[in-house]
Image: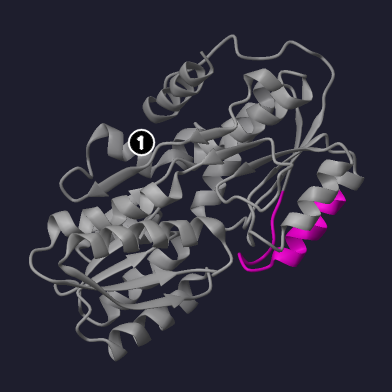
Amino acid sequence: MRRNRYAALLLAFLFGVGLSGCGGGSTERQTVALVAKSTRTEFWLSVFAGAEAAATEYNLDLTIVGPETEEDYETQNRMVADAAAAGAGAIVFSAIDYENNAAAVDAAAQQGVKIVAIDSSVASDLVSAYIGTDNYAAGQMAAQAALDRVEGPLKVGLVNYDVNSANGQERERGATDVFLQSGRAEIVTVINTLAEAERARADTAALLARNPEVNVLVAFNEPTSVGAARAVEAAGKGEDVFLVGFDSNVVTIDGLQEGTVDVLIVQNPYAMGYLGVESAYRLLSGQDGEVEQTVDTSTKAVDRNNLFTVDSQKALFAFEKGRN
């Protein structure tokens, strides 16, 4: 029954179906803190929209914080400690660093704070639930998208972000396994850059200059995808380099229409935010049995052939849907 509940919610997020009768009915407001990797990208704005919707539905006080950059795990650790000290009953958390965020999460949990991980997991046994993309499968999807659409040998460059971020590394592993198992793809180079569009652009441009044989690029999150798209466009290689990116924003969607981006692997950040806060509410309400330990939110491959379908538009513009 719990799986059916989450399936219904995911369908609602994808197709815009309203849900009613889900609220808890308690008048006591509890506090949930969402500690994100960033507060700047459209991905995270969509997460926040989902989280705010759930907080309203379940009568929760919600605080949302995140560091300036997606590499600053130390600030995240301070934010977790601050949330626990301020009396948050639950923390919804996306780890920048799988190992180095663990002690802060453990310390908060040992104070009685419920922990729900979203998007990127953390090396803690005290996390009650993980809600997000099956990142290994998403990496596989990205590689298969290139294999299905590019004929002949593939010379692949991978553009990843922080080497200690679990979701990026899982995506890379999934993509690498599928490419190598295909028998016609070679991983020419792998770079780890900052999760910042300009730095990713510069590093991807250098990758292409060093490795002119690369005919497939895979970038594993929104900022690296924006940077890679700009690098491909600046190099005039839209016809020569097949780019698979992750997530959606104005730059990558324009690139998909214009030819510098070929496929976007689009996650469901709105669902991550909503279900993360809903799970926090259930844990605080003593409904632990209603909380699924792992929830795989939806992931969709969008290309120019299906760009304007209803499903693709809802996936690409989840943030706007969440605000309506």
Q: Nearer the viewer, residue 318 or 161?
A: 161
**Left or right of 269 on screen, residue 241:** left
Magenta-span inclusion, residue 127: no
**Left or right of 312 on screen, residue 290:** right
Type of colouring: one colour
Q: Vertical placement of 193 versus 323: above or below?
A: below
- Under mark 1, the amino acid is Lys
Q: In percent of the image, x 32 and y 53: which residue is there?
A: 140
Q: In percent of the image, x 37 and y 47: which residue is there?
A: 137
Q: Residue 55: tell me if it is visible.
A: yes
Q: Nearer the viewer, residue 319 or 173?
A: 173
**Residue occupying the far left of the picture:** 152
Residue 141, horizontal then vertical, whole percent = 30, 50
Q: In percent of the image, x 62 and y 55: which residue is there?
A: 39
**Residue occupying the far bottom of the picture:** 210
Q: In percent of the image, x 44 and y 27: which residue is there?
A: 10
State the extent of the magenta-drawn residues as a range: 65-82
Q: Nearer the viewer, residue 34 or 309?
A: 34
Residue 126, horizontal then vertical, whole percent = 74, 42
Residue 45, horizontal then vertical, whole percent = 56, 47
Q: Secondary structure at mark 1?
A: helix
**Left or right of 134 on screen, residue 103:** right
Q: Vertical placement of 139 versus 197: above or below?
A: above
Mark 1 closeness class: few <14, some 14–19, many ≥20 residues within 10 Å:
some
Magenta-span inclusion, residue 73: yes
Residue at the spot of label 1: 314
Q: Nearer the viewer, residue 311 or 294?
A: 294
Q: Quadrant of residue 309?
A: top left
Q: Residue 261: tell me if it is visible.
A: no
The number of callouts visible is 1
